[in-house]
Amino acid sequence: MERNTPDPGAFFRDMLGQWEKTVNSFGGEAMKSEEFSRTMGAATAATANMQAGMQQMTEKALAAANLPTRTDIDSLATRVAGIEASLARIEAALGCAITDAAKPRPTRGRKPPAVKT
């Protein structure tokens, strides 16, 4: 004796599919309007202005606390990278640069390394 039990999720899937079609058609029509374009442009400009204002406030607060800003850290990182590159060139010219092959590598075994006493 076979029973035809309806799928409990079928109603939900059908309802969700119809809702998606309705929202997509409404959204597509709304995005075609000139008013939508102006509103989105204004929202984008407001977001950019807010981000710029927050950055200025953060920089002022960090300066008042005598802390570096992100720009300061980035410029320091660039300077350190340049110093490291110069040092590597000097070491290479003197012949005292340590290559990656000369660095000791860990073993790939399951046993821990033997302790030297």
Image: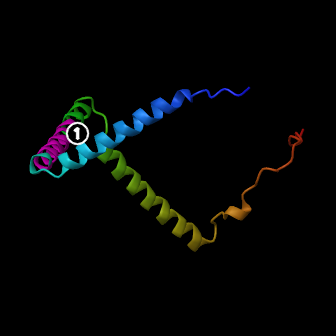
- 75 over 114 or under it: above or below: below
Q: Residue 47: in sight, yes or no?
A: yes
- Specify the amino acid type for callout 1: Gln
Answer with left or right where residue 57 lies relative to residue 108: left
Q: Could you tell me residue 27's position as x and y percent?
A: 24, 44
- 6 over 39 or under it: above or below: above
Majority secondary structure of magenta residues: helix
Q: Residue at x 40, y 39 (%)?
A: 17
- Element type at mark 1: helix
In this rendered view, identify the residue nearer to me: 22 or 55: 22
Task: Tell me how many marks there are.
Answer: 1
Q: Residue 69: in sight, yes or no?
A: no
Quadrant of the drawing holding the C terminus:
top right
Span of residues in magenta: 37-55
Q: Could you tell me residue 50's position as x and y percent?
A: 18, 38
Q: Name the residue under label 1.
A: 55
Q: Residue at x 19, y 42 (%)?
A: 52
Classify residue 7 by image quadrant. Answer: top right
Classify residue 47 by image quadrant. Answer: top left
- 51 over 5 or under it: above or below: below
Answer with left or right where residue 70 lies relative to residue 80: left
Q: Could you tell me residue 88's position as x and y percent?
A: 54, 65
Q: Which residue is drawn at 31% across and 39% down?
A: 68
- 61 over 97 or under it: above or below: above
